[in-house]
């Protein structure tokens, strides 16, 4: 029961679910966090049931729910060693001139405020374990995409990562930004022609976590390989 604990927000599908699978295979107990417990039930059983995985329903835009979520994880597992702040949502078409402002609001609250709340309520546990914090950014947070509020939110995630790394300097907690390009997940209505698989991104997460204590992988930017020229 002393096995380390890996907490993942946005764990119900895509990158989050695949990271949970790879973390469990690597020997972690896994806290699966998403808005709906029903979507996580099958994954919980796949990972070995209640002794190996914990499902907590949580809307990451709620401070009360995030605080309660962390309390539940600590009550069950008594520690948190790795946190992947992964919950996020995409934007709406139309650019800054014609997009739906309601979608902007939900996206900003989820992608920025929600990440901030995850940090706010997990950092004390990570300091206690001298653990590892990872944030799911995006290649879209490294380039300028015309009219993209989504890209702006991922630029903000990059800034949060840089800022929390400096805040935690000397604490023993490592901080890694994971910045994938296009990934074939339910995030997209149509499958991108060139895309990473969720497992590719999960391997990057586990690579960073598996490094020796004296190695701090600050950022991993990964994109699908361009097609070979004919």
Image (cartoon, rainbow, N blue to C red):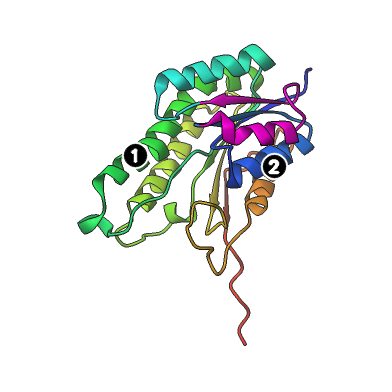
* 185 within the magenta span: no
Q: Quadrant of residue 80?
A: top right
Q: Position of residue 88 (x, y in %)?
A: 46, 42
Magenta residues, start to end: 36-57
Find out whether residue 43 is within the magenta segment.
Answer: yes
Foreground residue among 115 and 21: 21
Q: Position of residue 130 (x, y in %)?
A: 64, 23
The residue singled out by tag 1 in the image is 106
Q: Find residue 127 and report its horizontal and vertical position in percent.
A: 59, 20
Residue 75 found in image quarter: top right
Asked whether the viewer can see residue 36, the reply is yes
For the point 53% across and 28% down, the residue is 169
* Residue depicted at 46% across the width and 39% down the height: 162
Q: Find disc 2 in the rendering and name its residue.
A: 206
| Residue at image coords 62%, 26% | 55
- Decide if residue 78 is in sight here: no
In the rendered view, tell whether residue 161 sits above or below residue 79. Answer: below
- Looking at the image, do the residues carrying marks 2 and 1 touch, with CB atoms under 8 Å apart? no
Q: Is residue 85 above or below residue 128?
A: below
The N terminus lies in which quarter of the figure? top right
Rendered position, 46 above or below 78:
below
Q: Is residue 68 left or right of residue 127?
A: left
> Mark 2 and mark 1: span between their CA atoms?
29 Å
The residue at the point 43 percent across, 26 percent down is 117
Q: Secondary structure at mark 2?
A: helix
């Amino acid at each position: 029961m002393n096995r380390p604990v890996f907490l993942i927000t946005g764990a119900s599908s895509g990158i989050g679910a695949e990271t949970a699978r790879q973390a469990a295979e690597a020997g972690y107990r896994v806290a699966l966090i998403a808005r709906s417990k029903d979507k996580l039930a099958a994954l919980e059983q796949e990972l070995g049931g209640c002794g190996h995985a914990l499902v907590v329903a949580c809307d990451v835009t709620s401070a009360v729910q995030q605080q309660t979520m962390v309390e539940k994880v600590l009550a069950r597992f008594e520690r948190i060693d790795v946190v992947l702040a992964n919950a996020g949502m995409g934007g709406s078409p139309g650019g800054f001139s014609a997009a739906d402002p309601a979608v902007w609001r939900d996206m900003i609250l989820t992608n920025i405020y929600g990440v901030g709340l995850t940090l706010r309520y997990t950092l004390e546990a990570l300091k206690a374990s001298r653990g590892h914090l990872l944030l799911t950014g995006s290649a879209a947070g490294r380039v300028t995409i015309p009219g993209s509020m989504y890209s702006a939110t991922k630029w903000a995630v990059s800034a949060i990562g840089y800022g929390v790394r400096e805040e935690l300097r000397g604490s023993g907690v490592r901080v890694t930004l994971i910045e994938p390009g296009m990934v074939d997940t339910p995030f997209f209505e149509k499958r991108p022609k060139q895309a990473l698989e969720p497992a590719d991104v999960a391997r990057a997460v586990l690579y960073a976590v598996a490094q020796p204590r004296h190695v701090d992988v600050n950022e991993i930017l990964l994109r699908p390989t361009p097609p070979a020229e004919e």
